[in-house]
Amino acid sequence: MDFIEKLIEDFALLPGIGKKSAMRIALYLVQNRNISEVLLNDLDYTIKNIKICKYCNNLSTDDECNICKDNTRDKKVCVVETISDLYAIEETKDYKGYYFVLSKLINPSKGIFVEDLGLDKLKNLIINKNIEEVIFMLNYTPEAQITIDYIKEYLDGMNLRFSKISVGIPIGASIEFLDKTTLRLAFNERKEI
Ligand SMILES: [Zn+2]
């Protein structure tokens, strides 16, 4: 097989990239060597140095991600399920607090229990960043509700306010795909729990 064809197939494996886009990207990169080289270097460096932030589970090439490094942020933590959710919220430029990425939700039938969530890390973030409010930004599922209940219980006695995103997110919608206006509205109308 010609390697250009192979390259097109490789790009088509990426999320959101169809065959046509894969073809355009592959042809562009093989014809623009300077851009390809920057991309290769950056990708290589990132892959070799990628770490999980010691506070929030975001990805970073440092031990602490840029968000956690920023001490001017609001004393809030937004609990999300995925790093894509974190990026989607960060894109709105409206929320200025910290995040905590769970990566999974409690689901006993899949063998995921509260001790699998690494909540000691969340506690550590709350203490280190003097967090006053915990905001849950999770998709509407029974697993999310169980997870919220357990986290609240786990953090009981830490003098925190808890709130949950209550409107603006259609049932079954995924946070990472919501538009900025919907996300912004959802934040502003969050409900204390
Ligand atoms: Zn972080």
Image: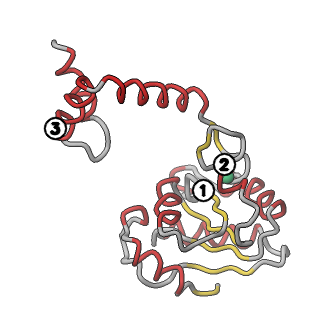
- Residue 13: x and y in percent read 28, 35
- Residue 193: x and y in percent read 64, 84
Q: Quadrant of residue 59?
A: top right
Q: Quadrant of residue 96?
A: bottom right
Q: Residues within 10 Å of mark 1 (few under 14, many from 20)?
A: many
Three-letter amino acid code at disc 3? Lys
Q: How many marks?
A: 3
Determine whether, in the image, residue 43 is placed left or right of residue 118. left
Q: Earlier in the sequence, mark 3 or mark 2?
A: 3
Q: Please give the name of the residue rendered at 48% of the width and 69% of the height, measured from the top-left corner.
A: 92
The mark lying in front, picked from 3 and 1, is: 3
Q: How is the image coloured?
A: secondary structure
Residue 81 disc label: none
Q: Please give the name of the residue rendered at 53% of the width and 59% of the height, measured from the top-left corner.
A: 86
Q: Please give the name of the residue rendered at 63% of the width and 55% of the height, measured from the top-left corner.
A: 113
Marks 3/2: CA distance? 34 Å
Marks 3/1: CA distance? 32 Å
Determine whether, in the image, residue 159 is placed left or right of residue 27. right
Determine whether, in the image, residue 76 is placed left or right of residue 32. right
Report the residue marked by disc 3: 19
Report the residue marked by disc 2: 65
Q: Label 1 near label 3: C-beta < 8 Å?
A: no
* In the rendered image, the vertical position of residue 108 relative to residue 133, given as above or below: above
